[in-house]
Image (tube, rainbow, N blue to C red):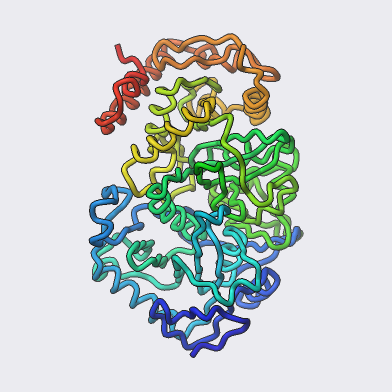
Amino acid sequence: MSREKVHASRYGLDTIGLAHQATAFWNSPPATLVVEALRRREATLADNGALVALTGMRTGRSPRDKFVVKEPETESQVNWGKVNIPIPPEGFASLRDKVYHHLCYEDVFVQDLHAGADPAYRLNVRVITELAWHSLFARQLFIRPPRDATADFKPDFTVVCAPNCLADPQRDRINSETFVVISFSRKLVLIGGTRYAGEMKKSIFTVLNYVLPAEGVLSMHCAANSGHAGDTALFFGLSGTGKTTLSADPRRRLIGDDEHGWSDDGLFNFEGGCYAKVIRLSREYEPEIYNAIRFGAVLENVVLDRETRTPRYDDDSITENTRAAFPLEFIDNAVEPPLGGHPRHVIFLTCDAFGLLPPVARLTHAQAMYHFLSGYTAKIAGTEAGVTEPEATFSACFAAPFIVLEPTRYADLLGARIARHQSHVWLVNTGWTGGPYGEGHRIALPVTRAIITAILNGDLDDAPYERDPVFGLDFARACPDAPAAVLTPRSTWKNTQDYDAKRRELARKFAENFAQFTAAPADVKAAGPALA
């Protein structure tokens, strides 16, 4: 029997077959976890009270090392391929035995938490970690049940995170020492060989992307906020496109910054916290996030000033993918509980590294489906291992690394919902203007904020629009507090012939990518760029 520091659930570690012989810290509060992390020299403190941890070589997700166990009940459901890489049950069993043997005589930290703010679709998640700061991360990112509810907590899914347990690539027949393996039949996630805490939250997001569509709920990689009149908005986008920054608006209330469900009853956050990129964070432009970083928050790979221990948010010497994790209540205007009505506006955020797409365009229903399935953006340096410069990518549903089913399953759910609730859909480019990366510059945050405000206030409903002859997008020619010149991307380039050539090149990439969606309706296929 393990020695337990605080009251544990009667569903112990042995329920997953872990014969643990050391100390288990059950549902420890932030102060205890901070003390343990400092005592064990896992992390340091910044002058603002945040716990600062380094993740070593892995400063982003490791998509090539993420696997799904190929089991009878998942074999015909999972969209197998480069994202959902299959691993046989015996391979999973071997890695599980390795992780359990590694943890047997190591102290562990256990958190019993929820994923899903709507009780009708809530998942009980147990997170077992060997690092105290990882336990703090999980506690702050997921939804924390009342303390008196943990005694009878029965997990629906368990995440076991052992970063110091390394795989043997040849013997275990995987790609590296790192592994993230999901077994839907065992309801178990194994993580090893990486200290990047984001793997924990994204593994459960992957689980929800498998479970919820079967219940008629659209699982989404998006942020959400609400106006004071109750009007809600969604912000889809991959990491680095601005979901957290743009949804944390002081004039609106934050529902969540990254993962949500859309049911027949409305929106609900999957999480109880935020995981914000903080590279070049400033109090002036992102005050809500800046002020949320205090005691109880976790900073990942942020450099501290050696003398003052002040975070140097402009320092990217470790990685561009510096992060802050903190509970939603650290945002002053967060919605509690994090629920919302059906969205009036749905915004697709793309970080166009080539400077070709307009800062804002309104989409027809068919265009919305086309661009949702396309999920065009650029991977930002540091978000994934090996990405050092922005590179163009197409990520179906703005969530390809995390979706388990065929992308059209999610697109069908989205299409039905925006039609039923008459949601307005927009494409907003937060990327480059005046040329591609290296020549132009990123669209200023105040300009993008002005565009979002105009969308949500209805100021763009009657604005003048112009149709892009290649992409077919109707882009706004005027927007309050946004320079008119920036709204027309072609006019920002020094050489318009270069722009035209690059635009045709990107249009071809769109068409080549969309060729995979052979079952898409004819009107959706026709909503893409014109190549003639």
Above or below, 152 against 344 in this view is: below
Q: Position of residue 152 (x, y in %)?
A: 55, 75
Above or below, 19 against 45 in this view is: below
Which quadrant is the C terminus positioned in?
top left
Q: Is residue 224 left or right of residue 186?
A: right
Residue in the image at 40% along x and 23% along y:
366
Q: Nearer the viewer, residue 161 or 437?
A: 161
Q: Quadrant of residue 97?
A: bottom left
Q: Nearer the viewer, residue 516 or 124?
A: 124
Q: Quadrant of residue 140?
A: bottom right
Q: Nearer the viewer, residue 307 or 158?
A: 158
Q: Position of residue 44 (x, y in %)?
A: 66, 67
Q: Is residue 386 visible?
A: no
Residue in the image at 38% along x and 80% along y:
17
Q: Position of residue 277 (x, y in %)?
A: 59, 47
Residue located farthest toward the bottom when viewing the structure as drawn: 1
Residue in the image at 26% along x and 29% along y:
515
Q: Is residue 226 left or right of residue 528?
A: right
Above or below, 468 against 43 in this view is: above
Q: Position of residue 353 (x, y in %)?
A: 47, 30
